[in-house]
Image (cartoon, grey):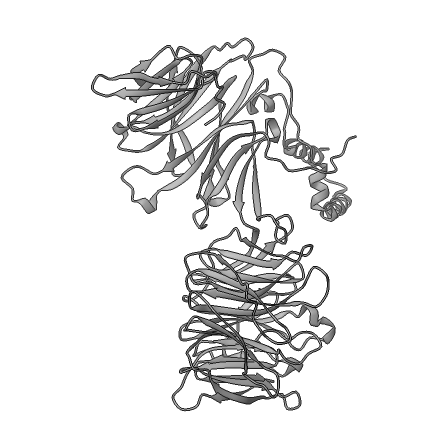
Amino acid sequence: NLRRIYTMESLAPTTGVLVAELAGNEVSPQIYTLNGRGPSSSLRILRHGAAVTELAVSDLPGVPGAVFTVKDSSQDDSDKKRKLDKYIVVSFADATLVLSIGETVEEVGKGSGFLTEAPTLACTALANDCGIVQVHPAGVRIISKGRAKQWDCPGLKRIECASANESQVMIALAGGDLIYFELDQNSGDLQEKLTMNMGGDVSCMDVGTVKSGRTRSMFASVGFRDQTVRIVSLEPGRLLVQRGSTALRARPHSVVLQYMPTAAGGSDDLILTVGLDDGSSVRTGVDPITGSISTSPTGRFLGARPVSVSRITIDSSPATLLLSSRPWISRPDPKSGKHVMAPLSYAPLDHGCSFTSEMIKEGIVATSGTTLRILAVEAEGACIGTADEAFNSNKVDLRYTPRQTCLLECGGGGLPQDARKLLLVLVESDYNDYGMEEKQSMGFDPTGAGQKKKSEKKSGDDGDGMDIDSDEEDENKKKEDDEDDEDDEEEKEQKSTLIRGPVPSSPGHWASCVRLLDPSDGCSTLDCVEMGRNEAAFCCASVRFHSRKGEALLAIGTVTGMTLHPLKYSASHIALYRVVNGSRLQLLHRTKVDDGPVLALAHFQGKLLAGIGQTLRLFEMGKRQLLRKCELRGLPTMVKTIQGAADRAYVGDMMQSMQFVRYDPTANRMILIASDKVSRPIVCQ
C-alpha cells in the first residue's frame, strides 16, 4: 500500500479571495482563500503574524495596570536554566492580586505575604532563596520565610516607577531622585547603596538581567520625561554614573536592557529597546564594557497606543515582547544574527511578561481589558527568526470544489449595528460526482465513521443478546484504546487518505452544497444545505430588496444537469434563502430562468442583477418567485462576473473582457455604454 510521507502545503489552485476583518477582535484584516478541488478542497484563513495558541483565559475584577511573574527561587541550581514561576502578580490601581501557579492557578491573597491593598510597581524573586521583593508606592517590601520587612519612603514622597532583578532594586521618587538597593549575599537583606537626583522626572527604568556567573547587572537604563534615555553604571565605586544617553522623538513609555546572542557564537550583544508614547519603538546597541549607546538606532512604528516592552523566551533564546495596538515579537535571527520583528496574530494586549510552568515551557501571561490570558507563540513555521514576515494560516476542510464566496449580514435592517453579525457563505460543486445523499445510499461514507459504527454494532449484537466473554472483550478494547492513544497525531495524519468515492457512469452528474460559516468562531460550519440531484451551485450574492426593509437575503444561482463539452443543461434556477436564528438557512422560493446558466449574481439598487447566459437581467422580489423588471440581451458569450456601483454595472464576459452598462430608472432599461475590444477571458472577480 502507498503511505503518505510528506505534504507540501500550497494555496493552488485558488478559486476565490476575500479580504476583511471578520474575526471581530483583531486589528489587521484576514485573507480568506478558496483552495483545492474535490475532496481536498479547503478554505484557508491567512493572517499576517505569528500563530498564537490561547491556553487559558480568566476574568479579572477590574482593569489591571501591570502583570508580573515571580520565579520559584527554592529550586536546585541544576534547574537554574529553566526555573518555574511560582506566582502571577496582577497590579490594579489600588490593589494587588496574587495567583499561585500549580496544577491550577488559584488566588492566594495575604497568605503569600504580599501587600494586597496597594498597587505593585515591580516584584521578583531574590537570589539564594532570600525571598521575594515587592515595590509599591509607599516603599519596598521583602517577604522571606513567612516574614515581611519593609523600607518606607522618606517623608511624604512616593515611588513613581521601579525595576528589580534577583540581586538589585532601583526606584524613582517624585522629583527625579533615584535610590539603588543591592542584595547582601551574607545577610539576605537589601541594602540602600546610593541616592542621587537625576535632574528630571523619571518615566520608566530597567536594571537589566544578571548573566550566568555574575552577581549583578553592570548597567541600568532610565527613561526621562524630557524625551531622553540614559545608561547609568551599577558598578561598585561608580554607582549611578551616567555612561551614555540618547535623545528620542517622544517620551519613553518603557525600557528593557537585554543580552541577545550573536550569529558568530561569540559574546552576547547588549540591546536597549525603548517603547515610546507615540506608538513606535527604538532598538539600539549598548557597549557591554563602557555602556555607551550606539549612534545608529533602529525605529519602527507599531501602533496607535504607547508601547510596552518586556522580556520573553522563544525557542530557548531571548526575545522581546512589544505591545501596542497589536502585539509584536522582536528577536535575533539564529543564522544571520539580524534582528527581525513580526506581529502576533492575536487580539491587542495591554501588559505582558514571560511565563514558565511544568505544563508550559515557554509562554506569555498577558492582560487584555479585564481578562488574564496565558498564551504560547508558535515560532516553528511562523517565520519568526527569519528575514521573511511571519504569516500563518488556518484550514477548514470543504466537501466539494469551492466556486464562490460572499458575506451575509445576519439580522434585519431594523436591528442596531452591534446586534448584527457577519457570516460567510460558500457555494461548492463538483462535476462527475454523486451528492452526499446518493453516496450514503450506495453505502459509501467518506469519513469512515459509518463503517466503524457498523462494526461496533455488529460486534455488540452477535448471539442472542448475551455477552459471555464481556470481560475479555473489555480488556481487549482497553488494550486497543491504549495502542491508539500511543499513536502520534502526525502518524494518524499521514495515514489518513482522502477518498473520492464512486464515479458516475454517465455525464451530467453534479454534487453541490451551500455552506454557512461563522468567521468569529474560527469559520465553524453553522449549516450546510445539500443541493438537489445533479444540481450545481455556481454563484452567490447577498441582496437587500427594498420590499424586505433592508433584510439581507442570500441569492444562489444553480444549474441542473449541465455538461461542459458540449455545453448543455436541463434547467437554471435562482434560489433565495434567509438566515434563521443566525445559524440556519431557510429557503424562501426558487425561480426558474431561461436563456442560459446562472453564473453571476450581484446586489444592484435594491434589486438582484443576474447574469444568465448572454443576458443581463434585473429582478425584484415577489411573494412566490422573482419578478423580471428589465434585461439586456446580446452580450458576447456568457456573463461571468458582475459588479455594481451607483447606476453602473461592470459585467465580465467569459471570453470578451469587460462590458460597462448603465441603468436608467426612469425608462427602466439598461444601456451598454462601453466595451473592451480586446478579447480577454474573465475567470474571477
Q: Is residue 141 above or below residue 530?
A: below
Between 549 and 216, which is closer to the camera in this rendering? 216
Quarter holding the N terminus is top right
Most distant residue in the left direction: 666
Q: Quadrant of residue 191?
A: bottom right
Q: Is residue 6 left or right of residue 629?
A: right
**Residue sitting at x 28%, y 21%:** 663
Residue 509 pos. (x, y %): 56, 15
Q: Is residue 624 visible?
A: no
Quarter of the image for the C terminus: give it. Answer: top left
Residue depicted at x 67% and y 34%: 452
Q: Nearer the viewer, residue 482 or 619?
A: 619
User: Is the residue 311 above or below the residue 535 in the image?
Assistant: below
Return the residue nearer the eye: 424 or 469: 424
Asked if residue 564 is positioned above or below residue 485 in the image, the reply reads: above
- 209 vs 278, left or right, is right
Residue visible at 55% across and 81% down in the picture: 169
Residue occupying image coordinates x 73% and y 35%: 4
Residue 242 screen position, x and y as percent: 53, 80
Image coordinates of residue 612 in percent, x first then y, are 40, 15
Residue furthest to the front: 295
Q: What percent of the width, then of the height, locates residue 229?
A: 49, 72
Residue 136 to residue 481: above or below: below
Determine if residue 36 is in view.
Answer: yes
Residues 338 and 427: in front is 338
Labels in figure, total: 0
